[in-house]
Amino acid sequence: MKILFFGAGVISAIYGSALKQQGHDVVHYVRPSRLDKLKQGIELHLMDGRNKNKVTSSRYPISCVGELPNMDDFDLIVVSVRHYQLENVLAELAGKTGNATLLFFNHIWSDFSLVTSYIPADKFLWGFPSGGGGFRDADGTELDGVLMNRVHIAEINGEATPRLQKVAELFHGIGLRTIHPPNVLHWQWKHFSLNAGISNGILKAGGDEKFLSSVPRIRQGILFIREALEVTRSRGVDIKQFADAKVFFMPSWVAACAFWMAMRINKAQATIFKLHKGAEENKIIYRDLMEVAKRNGVETPGLNAMKSMHG
């Protein structure tokens, strides 16, 4: 399959490398200023969930272009950006997608009308990666990454379609399990809320290590998660349908102990927390969550108190 990644950030580099290793033709569309910096490829230090979290180092011989190519030359276009960057990407892609299927691989906190105002619904799938990491250098040429053994992908109407199956088989071919949420928008909002709660817990604790090593600090993060999930509930989402959200409504000390223990077992997820570098992203996630809380009249006293820490 011929695949175009929009950018060469953490997620694009990890999944692009995995697909290229399996024999797919992978190209990255990057800013012209990055073309020279990426000529020698990306040094990738990967914790691989497909192989018992073994860490390996290799050079990803990345293929890049500085101008948006003809989309008819590609079978799949993968876009993985921060949720607040999405509209700029949509504006650039509008009317240019050709015959390719688009896979959006990131959060969305609006509804899908934002996307369909630029791109028809029958042109794209929505998903979310199970991976992460951080670059060691400002040029983005050395990456500590984590690839877990699953991804979420779905049609926005929840249907099982031939193109969804085709993309699922692509990921199966690189050793990943695919999960297909029946309502991917509600899944996305739930996941956004979980991230908001955890990122505020880490911020209040003074960093990921202080957070992950302390049950009381984790408990505070869980209280933030509960408030964030109430914001999502106010949008009509049945939180109880999601096992990974429902668990946070257990007695808080029990949930905190369970989370603490889980992070000692789930080394991949704990490493993602430690490698993530996203102060600006976390600030905007907080802002956007609180805007919906205010609009829907949801009380969030704990999260309200975090405002000064976001600057």
Image (cartoon, rainbow, N blue to C red):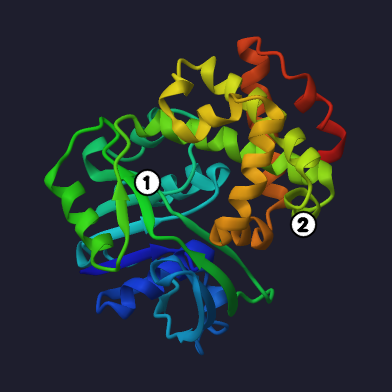
Q: Position of residue 239 (x, y in %)?
A: 48, 22
Q: Is residue 48 left or right of residue 286?
A: left
- For badge 1, the amino acid type reads Gly
Say which quadrant the C terminus sits in: top right
Q: Residues within 10 Å of mark 1 (few under 14, many from 20)?
A: many
The residue wearing badge 1 is: 127
Residue 254 visible somewhere in the drawing: yes
The quadrant holding residue 226 is top right
Q: Position of residue 250 (x, y in %)?
A: 60, 25
Separation of residues labelled 1 and 2 (CA atoms):
29 Å
Q: Is residue 141 left or right of residue 17?
A: right
Look at the numbered disc 2 and give the secondary structure of its residue.
helix
Disc nearest the viewer among 1 and 2: 2
Q: Is residue 238 left or right of residue 249?
A: left
Q: Disc count in the image? A: 2
Point 23% across, 55% down: residue:
167
The residue wearing badge 2 is: 209
Point 42% across, 77% down: residue:
64
